[in-house]
Amino acid sequence: MMQSTGAVTEMTVLYKTLDIALFSENGFLWVGSSDLQCMYTEFDTGVTNRPSQLSWCGTYDSMLDMSASIILVWDALNQFLVVGVGAEAESSIHYTESSICVCHEIDGARIISSKSHELVRRVPQAMVDVFRVGSSQSGALLYDAQREFDQSSHKANDYMQEIVERDDIELAVNQCISAAACSTKPKLQKALLRAASYGKCFLANDSPEHFVDMCKTLRVLNEVQSFRIGIPLTYQQLHSFTIKGLIKRLVRMRLYYLALPIVEYLKIPGGQQMVLSHWAMDKVKRSKESDEAIADAIFKRVGPSDSISYASVANEAKNYGRTELAIKLLDYEPRSAEQVPA
């Protein structure tokens, strides 16, 4: 292991598999297992300067799926190098205008500078299957068929006939749905989902749940990714983070006006109760309005239901010294036992 490449000057560990990347004083990058017994990649960067930052880009589940890369940053040279992990070790060099910070993500890495925020990742396989030049994958044929159909071209029938002969309609639909999930551009997502919807017309006993769930999830993702919210999650990151995790993040950011419609739209069990409870307690703590105005606002939004505990909100008001507000909130508590303090 790195017998002739000099001392190690920088290192980073992949948390999921505990694999390690080492940079030596002679400019060599070594990637392998943490016990140093198995080497995945050895690459000569041609730069002997110690990198300002060494980071993983993406992750993988096993040695059979080497989808991660390594990013080396040299602020003094205004450049960073991306090196693929695997036998071929493909690399690409990129130049920057200022210092950058690299943040490792499950499906790539974020490149953050004083002027921009970008995501670097390997092109997902689903996107390669559909958009690779000359691709003969069923998903690519379905995407082309739908575009030709929109133009009233007979070629749509030719593409669909080939997919039917392969008996790959379901595969083609799933490839288009997966590609839509990998895209961060709403216009391309719509085009891919239109292709999937077109292909579903040729399936006799197809369940719509997967397609509908993807449409809803992408709609939520596009909303939180917008400049108004500024949470640039990808689909894979959301899958790891979970929808409930996203709702909790929105609540902590006090974006109740967005969190509540999302839990109602996705029909998340207990989601409405959680958001409204946090909103009510936050209003009690932060609002400068009168006690009566606050109590009326909370009751107007929540109503005479047991979706939240008015007693818990009243207790929060009491802790903040708003006794009159606590009394008014207890009047709305539908459970008589909770109206009497312990």
Image: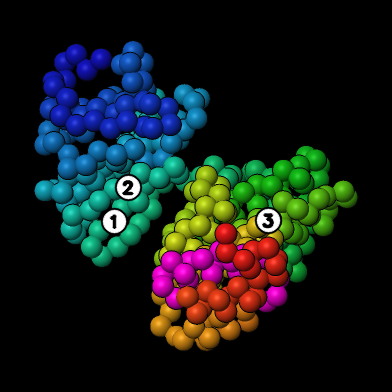
Relative height, residue 296 to residue 60 (above, below):
below
Asked if the residue under mark 1 is in contact with the one under mark 3, i.e. CB atoms within 8 Å, the reply is no
Circle 1 residue: 112
Q: Secondary structure at mark 1?
A: strand
Asked if the residue under mark 2 is in contact with the one under mark 1, i.e. CB atoms within 8 Å, the reply is yes
Q: Does residue 47 appear to the left or right of 82 in the view shown?
A: left
Circle 2 residue: 103
- The answer to which of marks 1 and 2 sits earlier in the sequence is 2
Relative height, residue 327 to residue 218 (above, below):
below
Residue stretch in magenta: 303-322
Relative height, residue 163 to residue 292 (above, below):
above
Displayed quadrant of residue 302: bottom right
Residue at 15% across, 49% down: 75
Q: Does residue 341 appear to the left or right of 173 in the view shown?
A: left
Circle 3 residue: 269
Foreground mark, 3 or 1, reads 3
- The answer to which of marks 3 and 1 sits earlier in the sequence is 1
Residue 256 visible, this orientation: no
Q: Give x and y (percent) for residue 114.
A: 23, 63
Crowding near pointer 1: few (<14 within 10 Å), some, many (20+)? some
Taking the view exactly as shown, the residue that stands out farthest to the right is 204
The quadrant the C terminus occupies is: bottom right
The residue closer to the viewer here, 92 or 218, is 218
Measure the alpha-carbon separation of dots 3 and 1.
Answer: 36 Å
Q: Amino acid at mark 1?
A: Ile
